[in-house]
Image (tube, grey):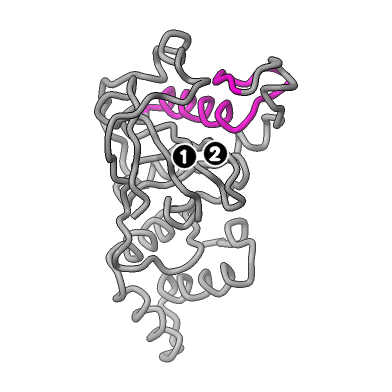
Amino acid sequence: MNFGPFWETEADRREATIVKIVVDRGTGMTKLGIAQDLLARTAAVRMMLAAVVACGTIATAGPLQASETPFIKAVAATPPPTGAKSLCVNYSWACASSRSNSLPREQELRIVNAVNKRVNRSTRAVTDESQYRKKDKWALPTRRGGDCEDFALLKKRELMQMGLDPSKLLLATVLDTDRNSHAVLVYRSSYGDLVLDNLTNKIKPWKATRYLFLRMQNPNRPGSWVGVSNS
């Protein structure tokens, strides 16, 4: 199994080495012991490593702590982002609540990884100010391109077209590591909430992004939005 495309830093490379030892069952007892200790520290890590073994698509920025939940917790109903107030009118599928039959989780992960990379590669980043003369407008990318929420919306549509359950695909707003406004697509996998981001091809657990999550579509009623807890 080739882990190369998913490890962009030296820390990531070291983590990949540990994971590969688990997969290949290497004979180095000391390194194998480190990997086993890492697996034993938290159930969330075990789930993430299982995803890597299955598809080689999930990257972690570091071991998750036992106190960290793999799923984002909704707190209370909240208004949608300003630019998304007409989202359900303009794109009814973006607010679909009907559930479809689940695909095998390894197949889902492969599809999610492929779509995330394809959209990131084929869509040019263009601001709403440049394209619409508006500060915030949620729409599918045009031929010129789109901004972060447009990337997320396109990924959601493509994943739904490929058979993923709409209730697993939630648009979300965050503050990035520089505390700038940003939008992503949350994939509610059986391993936990994973983030599809136009700023990277790496699909990460939501906590590993280091983002401050603000709100997301209600998993039960995607036409409405909920504020979320980052704890």
In the image, is 103 to the left or to the right of 139? left
Q: Which residue is mark 1?
A: 112
Q: Nearer the viewer, residue 230 or 193?
A: 230
161 within the magenta span:
yes
> Is 161 rendered above or below residue 46?
above
Q: Nearer the viewer, residue 187 or 74?
A: 74
Residue found 48% across the figure and 52% down from its top: 204
126 within the magenta span:
no
> Is 3 rendered above or below residue 224?
below
Badges 1 and 2: C-beta atoms under 8 Å apart? yes
Residue found 50% across the figure and 21% down from its top: 82
User: Which quadrant holds the C terminus?
Assistant: bottom left
Q: Secondary structure at mark 2?
A: helix
The magenta-colored residue range is 136-163
Q: Quadrant of residue 7?
A: bottom right
Q: Which residue is mark 2?
A: 116
